[in-house]
Image (cartoon, rainbow, N blue to C red):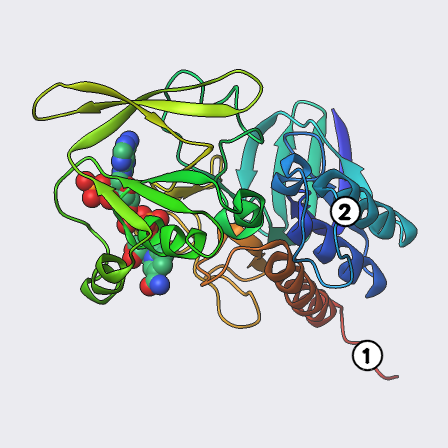
Amino acid sequence: MQQYEFDTVILGGGPAGFSAGLYAARGAVSTAIIDTNMLGGQPSNYLELENYPGFLKVGGYDLMEKFEEHADMFGVQKFPMQEIEEINLVSNPKVIKTKEGEFKAKTVIVATGAKPMKLGVPGEQEFVGRGVSYCAVCDGAFYKDKVVAVVGGGNSAVEEAMYLTKFASKVYVIHRRNELRADKIVQERAFKNEKLEFIWDSVVKEIKGSDLVSSAILENVKTNEVTELAINGIFPYIGITPNVEGFNGQIEQDSRGFILTDETMKTSVDGVFAVGDVRVTPLRQVITAASDGAIGAVYAVKYVETLKEIPVRS
Ligand code: NAP
């Protein structure tokens, strides 16, 4: 088995990971990015971004290519498509075993991201980017004067539904109960918003369309009545879940599995930092992930420096 040794290993090659790679490598520590997938992370699937400063409009894939090129410029080594066998973040050095080899690292920066929870209904996967979106901030502006639906009754669903009313002519909120989970203050604001219409006690059974989404099939869970709702877009907001497979429980996490950090991105384990969507953070965007990556890497480099032996004066 191939053996590798790095000062810093970054788990995850999305915006947080690339940014961390760039900053770590510029800090003159040997740096590798390991990903279980192709590099680029979630933004690679975004059609277009209009909110990354400096780029008025940019394809998600194109932006991530730029991030990668930038990390390459400073010699970050990349290991995409790795099949993880074991991750030990607690040991020193940290050890990541994949089918390809064993990676030893003085520090690990966890940048594995999160994934939206899926409805798991027919049409959902098929229409991603063509009417199904998990990011109102990214895609809302594409629905100017259109009719959209948000699924869920938590803070995210209700707040994002209100955000979408800036663009859409009508926003349905489809919730499986007849009471929202969202905070009362959020509910009060939502109930005053005339563009919002709540569809209670209902679940989405199917998303339909041809090129683009044109309707959703709903079922009332109390009456079992099935109806078809004409919509141009649908935003499931039924919660997100962090990608912590392989090291779940090794670091301090919140009740939903997100990693707790301090403002330097340090986790509860010495030498382990967490950046981007995988950590407990109030905003999950490319810009905030990139910012986290920079902070985490700077402090990871400082950590590596503290491990260097202090030369003995003769
Ligand atoms: P959440 O609070 O877990 O709410 C998820 C919602 O989706 C719930 O209403 C749930 O229904 C519904 N749901 C779950 N699985 C479903 C399924 N399979 N089909 C249909 N509906 C489903 O998630 P969140 O809204 O993403 O918020 C997560 C956390 O972040 C919460 O603690 C929230 O308070 C916090 N947050 C805070 C803010 C803020 O303070 N500004 C903003 C966003 C999020 P039930 O209600 O029936 O369970």
Label 2 vs label 1, nearer the camera: 2
C-alpha span from label 2 to label 1:
47 Å
Helix, strand or loop for disc 1: loop
Compared to residue 12, the image places residue 79 above or below, namely: above
- Residue 4 picture location, percent across and down: 77, 38
Callout 2 environment at 10 Å: few (<14), some (14 to 19), or many (20+)? Answer: many
Q: Residue at x 81, y 42 (%)?
A: 65
Asked whether mark 2 and ligand 1 are closer than 8 Å, the reply comes as: no
Residue carrying label 1: 312
Q: Nearer the viewer, residue 131 or 34?
A: 131
Compared to residue 47, the image places residue 50 above or below, namely: below
Which residue in the rendered view is the most extreme toward the right?
Answer: 73
Compared to residue 293, the image places residue 174 above or below, namely: above
Q: Is residue 250 at least partly visible in the picture?
A: yes
Q: Residue at x 19, y 35 (%)?
A: 176
- Residue 131 picture location, percent across and down: 51, 31
Which quadrant of the figure has residue 185? bottom left
Tell me the amino acid under the disc marked 2.
Leu
Which residue in the rendered view is the most extreme toward the left?
Answer: 223
Using residue 30 as the reference point, say whether residue 98 is left or right of it: left
Q: Nearer the viewer, residue 192 or 38?
A: 192
Helix, strand or loop for disc 2: helix
Where's the N terminus, which quadrant?
Answer: top right
Point out which mark residue 63 bears: 2
- Residue 187 picture location, percent across and down: 22, 59
Which quadrant of the figure has residue 83? top right
| Disc nearer the start of the sequence (2/1) | 2
